[in-house]
Image (cartoon, rainbow, N blue to C red):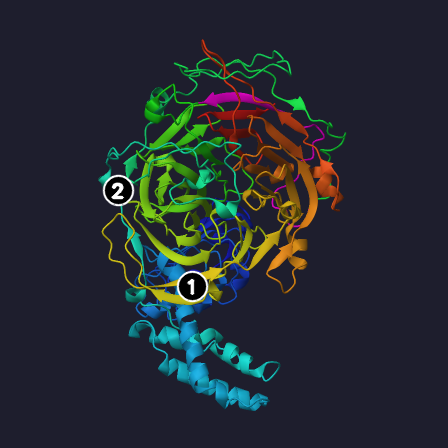
Amino acid sequence: MPTITEKLLLERGRPKSTQLEKIKSLNLSDLSLENADLDSTLLRRLTSLEELDVSGNLLTELPASLPLPALRRLNCANNQLEEVTSLKQFRMLEELSLEDNLYMTISDSYKLMFLLPKLRRLSGKEITSTANHVRFVASEELSRRVSSLWERSFQERLPSSPSAAQARVLGKEFVKAAETQVKYGASSLSDYTKWRAAKRKEISSESSPRKKTCLSAADDITQSAERSPRRCVRFENVSTATDKAGLSPGVKLQESPRKSVQSLRSPRKLDQSQQSPMKAAQSQQNSRKTFQPQQSPSKSITSLRSTKKAEHSEQSLRKPVAIKESPRKADQPKAAVSQPDSSLDTLRKSPRKRQAKEPAKKGQGEEGEEEQGSRTPRRTSKDPITMRPLHFLQCHSKQNSPDDFSTQLWACAFEPRIDSSGGSRGHSSRTVATCGGESVCIIDCETGSVLNKYKVSGEEFFCLAWSMMTLLTGDGRGHRVSVLAAAGRRGVVKLIHPKASLAYGEFRASRRAVSTLCFSPAQESFLFTGTYDKKIILWDIGGLDCEYKFKVSQLLVLEAASIPLHLRLVPSAPEQHLLAGCEDGLLLFDIQLSKNQLKRQCRPNNSHYSIFVKHSYTRERSSELEFQFPVYKKEEEENEFRLIDSLSFLSNDIVVSKSAMQGSIYLWSWSKTLASRRKSREVEVEILAELQWSSTELPYISLSTCPGEDYVVCGDEKGDLWTYEVSQCLRAGAKTDKMIPPTQILEWPAPNRKGHGPIAGTSVNSVAMDPELQYLVALTDKNIAAVWRRA
């Protein structure tokens, strides 16, 4: 048996190095190592270690004082492990192998799921969905049962002013009763239940003794037994690569109603029965046919069109066209093109911007003191940001028609880029996803080519969102991939892996339309959906294996008073707070799963797959706060200014939002607003600045922010882009009552359609920027995606 020395570690470590601190992978398998052979002092120096293999040894446990902060994969197979709680020190652990350890039980597996918050693969099996139920779901039902036991049998036995000894005795009796009387889960988990019960806190006789006795004694007991798999709802969508099939043709999609000045009414009074969530303000004079959703296809994996096929079938730019710098007169009319009959083959681009009424002050781009907690470094250059148009794409046409200038494009988002450590924060991508009409497109911003296109006949896509997930390969290894979720009128969320050209699955989020999607940055598989039935639902879509099997379960239901249009997790507390911009105001929800109140109900099988759905414990709660804005005081007869159609974070603390018809954009402080909260459910926002914007009466025009550049962009009804460099404003920190004009207004370039003249500007529904602001994408009401590049 060799002695663990620095030389041995360097020989068996990878990559080869002369320093232990640089080793990322270490193989100590089949060395007949015992517990005493593991030198904690030496191993503690492996601060960059991501993978450790100690299989085939004689270990009964790992040292308790072995902090390996970067460890993600641990192989302890074929040992003699008896105790697993020492593994709780590896908080970043994602994969753990415990095969061929004779003394391991199912209770040990549940302990590991509870102790390791990022664990997703255990002994070769994908456990993400199960582990999340262990951590978040079952404890809620236990909490209810334990609280019921306390109130029924122990609450009245506690004196009004108990001594510490009395509280301690009663607490121990209560814990023992909970262990024996509260039944939940399979009998094979009894050891796990007792282990959780043993972690209870001592009961104190300090303030609020009755409450503290119940909470402290029951706190861990309420989570001491986890659900049996038989008691857990699971919407399981199983799909494999061998099931590829084309989508069946469906009914012709009815066009969404167009925006009009006459359409907007009070958000409280909108007729929402059959309307598109994005166009709920349709004029009552417009006639419409009732839309009947087509049954979704039974096959969940659909081949996306290849790059070449997409480029030939879609009317996108065939070649990038050089920009011709010929200034357009300010008073030149923007004449619309009637009945165009060819694609946007040749675009003559006129000047890209005009100065705002008040030009930006010199030094506005200078770097100020970086805000505390900001995730992205601030721009240090003094040069103003200049954007120039690069491509104009017509890639969402119905039936690939070059004459389609009516399909409305609704949402776009840049693909997160994976860095060397497996993360995506702060790295730019030139790939953007866009949605509108029947299709979702993946576009290369530099070349203007459509890399992939996903189409569903009869659907109308309204929203999309990206997440980074781990795809497990056949040999058990995992690598990070980007996954795209998209949804719309039908209420079905489509899950797409663009790099593999696969739409690998779907699940029904609602029987009504989905208006917005948002992935959690804290839990990569947690997806929030905002739906037209005024609900916000948190789903766990599970992990991915090599056959693209996945499981979907519902974790939380939030009741909104109106249709949610935008969802944003608070960067400083992504596991606690969710902001929801709705048609009737801006709401704050507490999304901590440990605080849920349970309501048992039987859920219908809404999936398109044959899945047996059992009883579940669905958590429902209403909003915690409603934010009040100054514009609300301008309430008019036909407009209450409560429709929040833009919401984004510019930093960990700065929120950017606007109401429809407001004519301006608010910058406000999250922390100061929360600090000013009183007992009332309503709270006045702490406005830092107000940005001048268009006076349009059109709703549903969404802004975007680039935190790394202190940059805000919002389109308008004419196709122009209003841009704001707000670093100077943020540096000042204090509230200003002066309306801040835009730094620049990038005019609609009026691209020429060959033989038919310039295309008139139209409403810009959505904009998106990559983290480094190299590209800016704007989606319009005329089936045109405009790509701008930084000069």
Q: Quadrant of residue 308?
A: top left
Magenta residues, dominant SS class: loop
Q: For marks 2 and 1, give the one nearer the viewer.
A: 2
Q: At label 2, which amino acid type do we have?
A: Gln
The stretch drawn in magenta includes residue 25: no
In screen coordinates, is 501 left or right of 648? Answer: left
Q: From the viewer's side, name the closer residue of 169 and 259.
A: 259
Q: Where is residue 475 drawn, in percent x and y?
A: 31, 47
Toward the top, the furthest residue is 755
Q: How far is mark 2 from mark 1, CA to CA?
A: 35 Å
Q: Which residue is under mark 1?
A: 135
Q: From the viewer's side, name the closer residue of 154 and 409.
A: 409
Query: What residue range appears in magenta?
Result: 371-393
- Residue drawn 39% across the image and 20% down it: 315
Say whether residue 433 is visible.
no
- Residue drawn 34% across the image and 34% down it: 501
CB-based contact (under 8 Å), mark 2 and mark 1: no
- Residue drawn 32% across the image and 55% down it: 124
Q: At label 1, which amino acid type do we have?
A: Arg
Q: Which residue is under mark 2?
A: 295
Pointer 2: residues within 10 angstroms few (<14), some, or many (20+)?
A: few
Q: Where is residue 158 drawn, in percent x and y?
A: 52, 88
Say whether residue 215 is visible.
yes
Q: Quadrant of residue 221?
A: bottom left
Q: Where is residue 748 drawn, in percent x and y?
A: 56, 22
In screen coordinates, is 387 left or right of 411? Answer: right
Q: Which mark is first along the chain, 1 or 2?
A: 1
Q: Quadrant of residue 275?
A: top left
2 shown above or below 628: below
The stretch drawn in magenta includes residue 390: yes
SS state under label 2:
loop
Q: Where is residue 587 drawn, in percent x and y?
A: 55, 53
